[in-house]
Amino acid sequence: MFERPVASNTALLVHIDTEDARRQPSGASARADEPLTPHEHGSRLEARRQEFKELAVSAGLDVMEVITGKRRRPDSRLFVGKGKLDEIRQSIHDTGAELVLFGQRLSPSQERNLEAELKVRVLDRNSLILDIFAQRARSFDGKLQVELAQLQHLSTRLVRGWTHLERQKGGIGLRGPGETQLETDRRLLNERVKVLKGRLAKVRRQREQGRAQRGKTGIHTVALVGYTNAGKSTLFNKLNNENVYSADQLFATLDPTLRRLDLNGGQVAVIADTVGFIEDLPHELVDAFRSTLTETREADLLVHVVDVVDDEREQRQAEVNHVLQSIGAGDVPQLVVYNKIDLTELSPHIRRDDAGEVVAAWVSAVTGEGLSELLEAIAERLGGARVTGILRLSPDRGKLRAQLYAASAVSEEHVGDDGTVALTIDADAVDWARLASEHSIGAEFES
């Protein structure tokens, strides 16, 4: 009989360098199958190991030792080879660690086999991130989203708690208690997932109503995005004189927070502080947090906060853009903000592109340097610009027509004999850019 070990706060970290890690990650601008140079790989490997350790510390664990290694590809049964397994077992004996964390994703069978061999609890990086999210969720919808992500992750691992009972099974009249328990667990889990999805759908509808109301009043939404620990919440507090929790740790804040943002010239917007991203964010979290991330997808402007002193900032920018693309926010206008200039010799300033549009700003959220210039840049990106012209729609484009009216973008309408609708457009440039991208408006529009 296999009893699952009880975990504690003393942890041993295992981070194995595999062949897949030597290729460009999915968020990079280069091709995903392009190998990294030895220098790039060494830098990336050290950054990932350090981030993994920071994740463990953020979860409240005492890291006893970090074991590293290199392997061409993971072992299908134990992820690591026999020699590395013996090294881990010896380290557990020497340090007294009662939890082993792997820096890569483990299959359910690999976790089960490792626990049977090591006699301690074994978790992978995804499980660790889910645990951190569970600790940090405070709002009602945040807790729902975390629970949904955990249940989706658990659904593939139910067999582990009932291994000793699963052997007792057979045909009619011989069905064992293990199989019955597994079926019961799966049914209860699926029912709970259904309930959570229903509640989250209700939350999503409420958020959509709020966004629609802001659209009718002409109030723009600005969403802060960025890699975790880049300083988003600190910047959010400074811009709004708020007291949202922030700390020098990964995923210090989780729940989205919306506040009024007063801009220059009397302009008012809504600013949202969203969850920080991370490389290889577990897909369970991306799926569960779609209602929260909708605030990002529907924003009029994304303020992409970057840690200017981070040696991996370019890669992390690419990773954030990769996640934004995956949730449908890749076409939302961006203003890049390089934060933490107080730790450098840089001075606050802004950069414009060839068309004269502000595309980047250098600030310090801690000292407040450059924030007045940032507010001016946000106001400039949001304010004033209009798009005018004639949009001709076929009768089957009713959804787009309704959205244009909801955005107060139509000043006049004429219907032709063939049912074609000619709309005179006078729209905010930001709203128009989003709708044009969403509906692939091209030759239909005459400016």
Image (cartoon, rainbow, N blue to C red):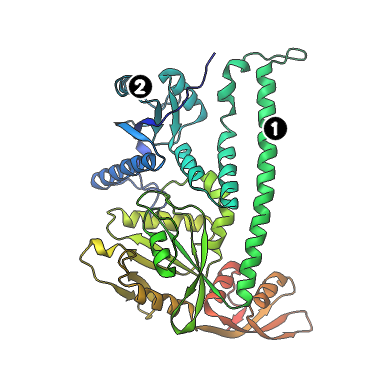
Callout 1, which amino acid?
A: Arg
Q: Helix, strand, or loop for circle 1? A: helix
Residue 186, quarter of the rendered image: top right
Q: Which mark is residue 85?
A: 2
Residue 159 left/right relative to 119: right
Q: Residues within 10 Å of mark 2 (few under 14, many from 20)?
A: some
Give the CA separation, mark 2 to mark 1: 36 Å
**Figure disc tally:** 2
Q: Is residue 163 above or below residue 314?
A: above
Residue 341 left/right relative to 29: left
Residue marked by disc 1 = 187
Residue pictured at 43% horizontal, 75% vertical: 378
User: Residue 444, percent across and down?
Assistant: 62, 78
**Is residue 29 at all visible to an observer of this figure?**
no
Viewer-nearest residue: 443 or 109:
109
Q: Which mark is residue 267?
A: none
Q: Residue furthest right?
A: 417
Residue pictured at 42% horizontal, 18% vertical: 117
Residue pictured at 39% horizontal, 52% vertical: 31
User: Residue 16, percent across and down?
Assistant: 34, 33
Residue 35 left/right relative to 275: left
Image quadrant occupied by the C terminus? bottom right
Residue 77, quarter of the rendered image: top left
Q: Is residue 383 above or below residue 43?
A: below
Residue 21 left/right relative to 332: left
Viewer-nearest residue: 189 or 426:
189
Q: Is residue 295 above or below residue 352?
A: above
Q: Helix, strand, or loop for circle 2? A: helix
**Is residue 94 at all visible to an observer of this figure?**
yes
User: Residue 391, percent across and down?
Assistant: 64, 81
Callout 2, which amino acid?
A: Leu
- Front label number (2 vs 1): 1
